[in-house]
Image: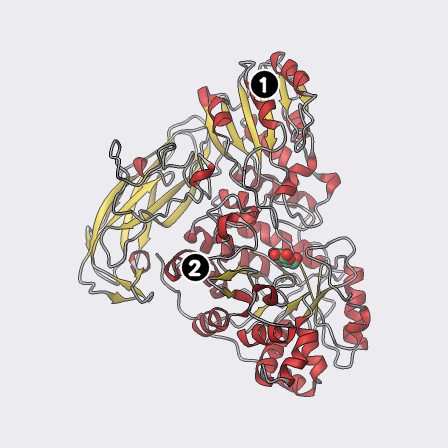
Amino acid sequence: MKPSEPRRSPRPVPAHLRDLLAAMTLDEKIGQLVMVSLGAETIVTGPKAAEEPSVDDVRTGRVGSVLNLVGRDRIHALQRIAVEESRLKIPLLFGLDVIHGYRTAFPVPLAETAAFRPDLWEATARAAAEEATDDGLALTFAPMLDLARDPRWGRIVEGPGEDPTVGRAYARAKVAGFQGRDLARPDGLAATAKHFFAYGAATAGRDYASVDLSERTLHEFYLPAFEAAVKAGCLAIMPAFCDIAGRPVSGDRGWLTELVRDAWGFDGIYVSDYDAIGELVAHGVAADMAEAAARALHAGLDVDMMSRAYPDGLKPALERGLVSQTDLDAAVLRVLAAKDRLGLFEAPYGRGDPSRPPARSRDARRALARDVAAASMVLLKNDAAVLPLGPRGGPIALIGPVAARPAEMIGSWFCLGDQEEIVSLADGLAAAFPERPLTVVEGCDLDGDDDAGIPAAVAAAEAADVVLLAIGEPAGMTGEAASRAHPRLTGRQRDLARAVLATGRPVVVLLSCGRPLVEPEIFEKAAAVLVVWGPGSEGGHAVADLVCGRRSPSGRLPVSWPAAIGQIPVFYGERPSGRPFAEGEHFTTRYLDVANEPAFPFGAGLGYAPFDLSDPVVDRPRFRPGEALRLTATLANRGSVEAATTVFLFVRDRVASTARPLLELARFRTETLAPGESRELVFTLGDDDFALLGPDLAPRLEPGAFDLSLGFSADRRALRTVTVELVDADAAIV
Ligand code: BGC
């Protein structure tokens, strides 16, 4: 476990903002805390407000921020009303969910995580920020950093998977990418770390349901990515919809202010989730809008997105003495400071300035989208090296409802993704195999009972040398409010798959999904399975790059892939149990009807070249607090093609004051090696890598033995381990 990083020092508030605050009326102050969806007919991301906001609210200073409005002309027109017609001329802040690209869609976040490439995570955020700021936007509601162990939860697709170390790296890369070198520049897009926090642990994977986890698990697993985002300087945080053990986060001062502001040093703004402040009433912790508003404001929540709790409830709350003027002023000042950091006072039209040339060409964005999509796909099985397919040979049958549907490539929650420009699987494969006949047959519907096309699909399979079976889960069935008790193929696709597999032709499954789908029978019978996720605008080309062998697959699973729905949540960072599983022993931790292991562990994934990893060697078997420990190992590509692989370094603290997880990820590294090439990998570990949270949840070092294990996944049977000993650490604080 990595303990807290040093506290960030909050920036001082500039004097001119204090003067501005002093000039504001109560209505104008409250207005700065209000974010509304205005003039946005096309993008709707939550329930409709009872009372529609109007442009006049901007003119009278009753609105401070706007979401879901797109197009630089519309944004500038509204900005003009704020900065030229309102009394105090305070600029508006425009935000949107720029999740995985703006017009050019990159792979969905879970997919992108599978690339295990922080450089690419940052690059796609930067490219999205360039496009979004070119259109006048200043804020994105991303990255989502919710750790998720439960594929029933549809929003698992939006985040970086199950591991806190990966979550930290992802948070840093995304904040750096979105915000750029300087937030005040016209291409700076403020990042929002969301949804703070533990939202991914919704009971039974049901979106918006209550969360109940131990403080230790919250601190060890669910908080680290948010802490990293704060330390990386993210401008905003969005509290989650959920309650944690009865404490709705949107109204919780302990989490929002005492931990994140006071202990971590967060000096940005909290933007509520859609309607979340008003929902404190439904949570049962506020009797009316005034109580909800008071509770959220006192907790430290600055901006009310679409609940009307602040515009309607704050005045009565002040009158009833439920909240203080000091809390109000502090929140207003933070919003003004955020706008100032974004350079909005100086250059309210800087973003979306038509005279500024685009930061990169369309071709460069498309090339990046293709590269990241290919790096994200995970090859889980490849019997008899059925993949890659040769450029010449017999017919290929591309079968399945995902085959020719571009919309399924773009994945859940695309922003403005240009529908005309999405490359379908059929188009991408046709371009990659000009010399092989390619038949495309849908077979059945993606969701629904129509299976009339199955006989035609079987006929196409029988006439082909190899079948590419493009199946999955509709993109629209992943994301928010998309929980599924049966995370499996939808409609009649299982029947289609069985019929095609029964032909005896080699079948390569191209699985389009936003979460692990539990389909053991199909995985077993298929010759190969390539998880393509929601790969984005260049999806069809990227799949084709891998299928034809132009490039070796290199994605690795960022989540354990369950073998059975009843195993959920299944994740690698479990604690050991007093009765660890032992073959043939009845009274050990196990199921009677299924193995404990997932179908594929965290980190699983194949390529077209086998890799070898030597035993790890350490420069010292014993070390003291403060010393750096060097671990080296040699990685070798034993194949005949260039390929990339990811090496994971895990730590296990064998004996400690609290039972430690069986494995904790300390480092991951993705390396590309030429055929026959070997490379020495050096990992330097320090106190942070060996620290744990003590019984009081404060970080400390405890002496004793630690296993350092290297491998290509979290499959413990395949790891190579060296044991080191920490001495002279008597529960030292780090
Ligand atoms: C989602 C957020 C999103 C917000 C604004 C909510 O429904 O939970 O993730 O940022 O809407 O669109």
Taking 222 as reference, is 469 above or below it?
above
Dividing the image into 4 quarters, which one contains the N terminus? bottom left
Dividing the image into 4 quarters, which one contains the C terminus? bottom left
Q: Nearer the viewer, residue 133 or 508?
A: 508
Lateral position of residue 367 relative to residue 419, left or right: left
Q: Are marks 1 and 2 in contact (CB under 8 Å)?
A: no
Q: Nearer the viewer, residue 492 or 3?
A: 492
Say how the picture is coloured: secondary structure
The label on residue 365 is none
**Which image quadrant for residue 139?**
bottom right
Q: Quadrant of ligand 1?
A: bottom right
**SS under mark 1:** helix
**Which image quadrant for residue 284?**
bottom right
Taking 467 as reference, is 243 above or below it?
below
> At 32% across and 42% down in the image, what residue appears?
710
Can you give x and y, in whole percent of width and height, for residue 353 in the image? 75, 62
Residue under pointer 2: 224
Question: What kind of residue is marked 2?
Answer: Pro
Q: Is residue 343 visible?
A: yes
Distance of label 1 from label 2 (alpha carbons) = 46 Å
Can you give x and y, in whole percent of width and height, for residue 484 in the image? 56, 42
Q: Is residue 237 visible?
A: no
Dot 1 or dot 2: first in sequence order is 2
Residue under pointer 1: 499
Can you give x and y, in whole percent of width and height, for residue 278 in the image? 64, 67
Question: What kind of residue is marked 1?
Answer: Ala
**SS under mark 2:** helix
**Residue at the top extreme?**
463
Q: Is mark 2 within 8 Å of ligand 1?
A: no
Callout 1: few (<14), some (14-19), or many (20+) C-alpha neighbours within 10 Å?
some
